[in-house]
Image (cartoon, grey):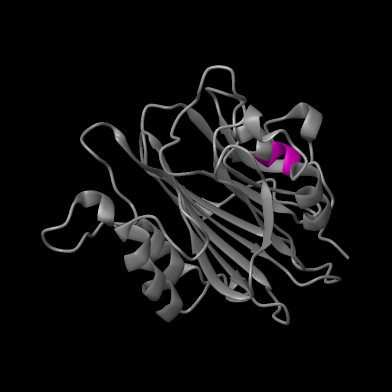
């Protein structure tokens, strides 16, 4: 189950900050975020080599999309499409409103259940596909929100419940000062409380080969500020460690 943190501050110089950990089978092949799709040159995202889609990305218009599995729906299923396609389809759109509207009309039976977050520097939506029959579009509120395989701000596991107050207490990233340290430390944290299972840490690996394979941070600047572009940071933990660094090929424009 993945974890995503989103901070919305509408009047701030950086109105959206997103932190995300991708949890997956550690032997599932993937490529770090880049411009992997010739027919989608505006998309900067990680690429899942098994199904061809993505788990998290941003486009040149400043739209961010991230997909998370719902509880009990890990992995592919015969006859159903990859949920990684949803990220790419969301990033085909110039703003979050258009993306959420378009994806709300998809056939829910074509996918296993999911949570999809779509945001730009003005709007943010949670597309909730929990029962196999409906795709609901809900607003992400201002302030700090967390989501995993359960509902927004109603986490499904001890790990996210424990992490929530730590993110609320931490100083958020400051892209103007290139200061990402507090959230990088939290997303990278492998410490679990004494006596609790390793997967209660925000970054973990289990004996069955499942765990946190990568982490990411994305910051979106306020509208109509040409000199500041979206920022994308990434770290890989499995199958080998690649330390935190800026993603090259960053998006070049943002919504008006």
Q: Residue at x 27, y 42 (%)?
A: 205
The answer to which quarter of the image holds residue 188 is: bottom left
Q: How many marks?
A: 0
Query: Is residue 37 positioned above or below 151 on the image?
Result: above
Q: Is residue 81 above or below residue 69?
A: above
**Magenta span dominant secondary structure:** helix
> Where on the picture, by quarter, is residue 210?
top left
* Image position of 198 (left or right of 227): left
Q: Is residue 60 visible?
A: no
Foreground of the two, 40 or 108: 108
Q: Position of residue 135 (x, y in %)?
A: 67, 45
Which residue range is magenta in the image? 87-91
Instruction: Kindly give the residue lying farthest to the top in the view shown.
Output: 78
Which residue is nearer to you in this view: 30 or 130? 130
Residue 128, given in percent of the width and then of the height, sits at: 61, 50
Viewer-side residue, 103 vs 231: 103
Q: Residue at x 50, y 30 (%)?
A: 30
Quadrant in which residue 159 is drawn: bottom left
Residue found 65% across the figure and 68% down from its top: 16
> Residue 163 location in percent, x, y?
36, 66
Judge whether 127 appears above or below 186 on screen: above
Residue 50 located left or right of residue 188: right
Residue 241 lies, in percent from the top left, at 36, 42
Image quadrant where one finds the N terminus: top left
Q: Is residue 59 magenta?
A: no
Residue 240 falls left or right of residue 207: right
Question: Can residue 161 be seen from the camera position used here?
Answer: yes
Picture quarter with the C terminus = bottom right
């Amino acid at each position: 189950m993945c974890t995503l943190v989103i901070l919305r501050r509408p009047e701030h110089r950086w109105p959206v900050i997103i932190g995300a950990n991708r949890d997956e089978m550690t032997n599932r092949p993937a490529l770090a975020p880049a411009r992997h799709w010739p027919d989608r040159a505006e998309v900067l995202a990680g690429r899942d080599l098994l199904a061809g889609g993505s788990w998290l990305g941003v486009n040149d218009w400043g739209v961010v999309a991230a997909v998370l599995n719902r509880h009990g729906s890990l992995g592919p299923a015969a006859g159903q499409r990859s949920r990684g396609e949803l990220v790419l389809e969301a990033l085909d759109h110039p703003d979050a409103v258009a993306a959420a509207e378009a994806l709300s009309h998809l056939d829910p039976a074509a996918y296993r259940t999911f949570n999809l977050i779509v945001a730009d520097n003005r709007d943010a939506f949670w597309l909730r596909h929990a029962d196999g029959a409906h795709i609901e579009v809900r607003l992400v509120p201002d302030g700090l929100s967390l989501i995993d395989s359960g509902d927004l701000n109603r986490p499904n596991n001890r790990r996210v419940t424990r992490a929530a107050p730590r993110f609320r207490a931490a100083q958020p990233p400051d892209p103007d000062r290139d200061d990402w340290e507090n959230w990088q430390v939290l997303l990278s944290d492998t410490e679990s409380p004494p006596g609790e299972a390793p997967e209660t840490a925000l970054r973990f690996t289990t004996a069955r080969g499942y765990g946190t394979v990568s982490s990411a941070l994305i910051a979106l600047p306020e509208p109509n500020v040409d000199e500041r572009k979206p920022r994308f940071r990434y770290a890989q933990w499995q199958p080998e460690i690649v330390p935190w660094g800026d993603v090259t090929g960053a998006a070049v424009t943002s919504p008006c």
